[in-house]
Image: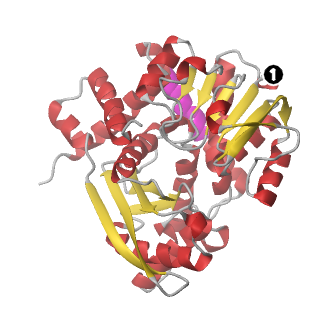
């Protein structure tokens, strides 16, 4: 499997070359600002002590505090976190919100932990990385296998350290402790907005579009429900245990209810079984990879039948696959644009927490719509002017904005 950090740097280098970025500035932007690795003990329910390893990485803070999720996954590596932090820098710049990029992770399988063990792990990890956190420094958010409840524990831990409540230290937390309405649906809603805009520009009617979604978690399920509302037919969905396919369509709400009941989409009546790999190649017009990195590679890219790929996950397409898809005329909506709805509403949540003044869900969704459409139009304009794919256009826009901020601020001291 391709190293995600090398992949992220390759994508940056391509944009830097196109911008003719000066060598010194390229050196600054090509590496993280700071990295923290922590090894920490957690008392398990049986009284034993188990050691865990976690990370927090800040890539660049020229445009504002660091922003980025925390994931709990057995396969987390420091290079994963570095890459995700860099991608967050570009994502925030693409939608023009005043953040830099960060990411965090703990090597663990939360499905094997009790609620008490998960809480103790979260509070100890938070304590270990606490020097990097704060509303003006670094504001974590949910990511793979982390939830609003996990964010609530992080907020409470930092608040206990400070001696007063600090709601703005995390986003994606429960609404009753300072979370924002619309945050849970924000990433999937942003994906649906970008798909709608792209389909319209391509002359594709959503009413006749067939959609396949790999990864039926929070993001994938919301995107599927909203695209179905817009008239699309959801023909396939999957989760970590496998997937289901029906050429005449699935009821996304019924599939979600089945997943809540059984823990998986697998076994839903009315759909034939497909693997996660097979789902990527089913006959469809729009493919939404909403699972993990490196799902679309040079091996399967020639067999993908979709006309539009909307990257709801981070880094699901390798650079080699990108080139194949571009040659085949497949429109790839890049992750740093397509899934930026989550960080956009995280920004709205942070603003509401700092002001202690909260918005209605309608206001949140209206503001999200404006930000996503403006970002899509900016990226599409650059792609047209330079005759380049949307991913490279998004990187050119983002790297230019961050580079301009570094130039204006200068190098301290």
Q: Residue 278 location in percent, x, y?
A: 65, 31
The reply to whether the magenta stretch includes residue 379 is: yes
Q: Looking at the rendering, in which quadrant would you find the N terminus?
A: top left
Q: How many marks?
A: 1
Across and down, in percent, residue 82 comes to 34, 49
Q: Return the residue nearer the eye: 358 or 133.
A: 133
* As drawn, 392 above or below 403: above
Q: Is residue 323 above or below residue 361?
A: above
Does 75 sit above or below residue 164? above
Quadrant location of residue 346? Answer: bottom right
- Count residues near mark 1 (Cα–Cα under 10 Å), then give few for <14, some for 14-19, many for 20+: few
Q: Is 271 in front, or is 344?
A: 271
In the rendered image, which residue does mark 1 sit on?
208
Q: Residue furthest left?
A: 413
Observer-nearest of 264 and 158: 264
Image colouring? secondary structure
The residue lying at 77 percent from left, 53 percent from top is 259
Image quadrant in which you'd find residue 118: bottom right
* Residue 40 position in % (x across, y down): 36, 75
> Magenta segment: does it hold 401?
no
| Closer to us: 21 or 283 | 283
Q: Which residues are magenta?
A: 370-380
From the viewer's perspective, tell me whether residue 274 is left or right of residue 37.
Answer: right
Q: Is residue 357 visible?
A: no
Could you tell me which secondary element the residue under label 1 belongs to?
Answer: helix
At a point 55% along the width and 30% down the height, the residue shown is 376
Question: Which quadrant of the view contains residue 276?
Answer: top right
The quarter in which the C terminus is drawn is: bottom left
Q: Is residue 125 visible?
A: yes
User: Magenta part mainly helix, strand or loop?
Assistant: helix
């Amino acid at each position: 499997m391709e190293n995600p950090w090398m992949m992220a740097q390759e994508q940056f280098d391509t944009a830097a070359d196109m911008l003719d970025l000066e060598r010194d500035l390229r050196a600054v932007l090509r590496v993280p600002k700071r990295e923290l690795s922590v090894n920490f003990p957690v008392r398990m329910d049986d009284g034993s002590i188990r050691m865990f390893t976690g990370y927090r990485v800040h890539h660049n803070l020229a445009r504002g505090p660091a922003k980025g999720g925390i994931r709990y996954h057995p396969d987390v590596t420091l290079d994963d976190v570095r890459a995700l932090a860099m991608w967050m820098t570009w994502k925030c710049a693409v939608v023009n919100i005043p953040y830099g990029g960060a990411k965090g992770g703990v090597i663990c399988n939360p499905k094997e932990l009790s609620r008490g063990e998960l809480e103790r792990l979260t509070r100890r990890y938070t304590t270990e990385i606490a020097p990097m956190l704060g509303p003006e420094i670094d504001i974590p958010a949910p990511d793979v296998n982390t939830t609003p409840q996990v964010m609530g524990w992080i907020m409470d831990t930092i608040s206990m350290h400070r001696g007063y409540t600090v709601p703005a230290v995390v986003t994606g937390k429960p609404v009753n402790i300072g979370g924002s309405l619309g945050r849970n649906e924000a990433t999937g809603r942003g994906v649906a907005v970008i798909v709608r805009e792209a389909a319209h520009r391509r002359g594709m009617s959503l009413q006749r579009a067939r959609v396949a979604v790999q990864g039926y978690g929070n993001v994938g399920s919301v995107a599927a429900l909203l695209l179905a509302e817009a008239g699309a037919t959801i023909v396939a969905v999957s989760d970590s245990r496998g997937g289901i396919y029906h050429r005449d369509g699935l009821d996304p709400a019924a599939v979600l209810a089945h997943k809540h009941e059984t823990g998986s989409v697998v076994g839903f009546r009315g759909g034939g079984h497909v693997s996660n790999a097979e789902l990527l190649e089913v006959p469809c017009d729009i493919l939404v990879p909403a699972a993990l990195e490196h799902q679309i590679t040079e091996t399967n890219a020639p067999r993908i039948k979709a006309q539009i790929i909307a990257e709801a996950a981070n880094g699901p397409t390798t650079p080699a696959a990108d080139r194949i898809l571009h040659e085949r005329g497949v429109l790839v909506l890049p992750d740093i644009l397509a899934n930026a709805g989550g960080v956009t509403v995280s920004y709205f949540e942070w603003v509401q927490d700092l002001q202690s003044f909260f918005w209605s869900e309608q206001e949140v969704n209206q503001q999200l719509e404006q930000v996503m459409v403006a970002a899509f139009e900016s990226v599409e304009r650059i792609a047209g002017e330079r005759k380049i794919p949307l991913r490279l256009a998004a990187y050119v826009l983002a790297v230019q904005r961050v580079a301009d901020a570094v130039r204006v601020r200068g190098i301290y001291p």
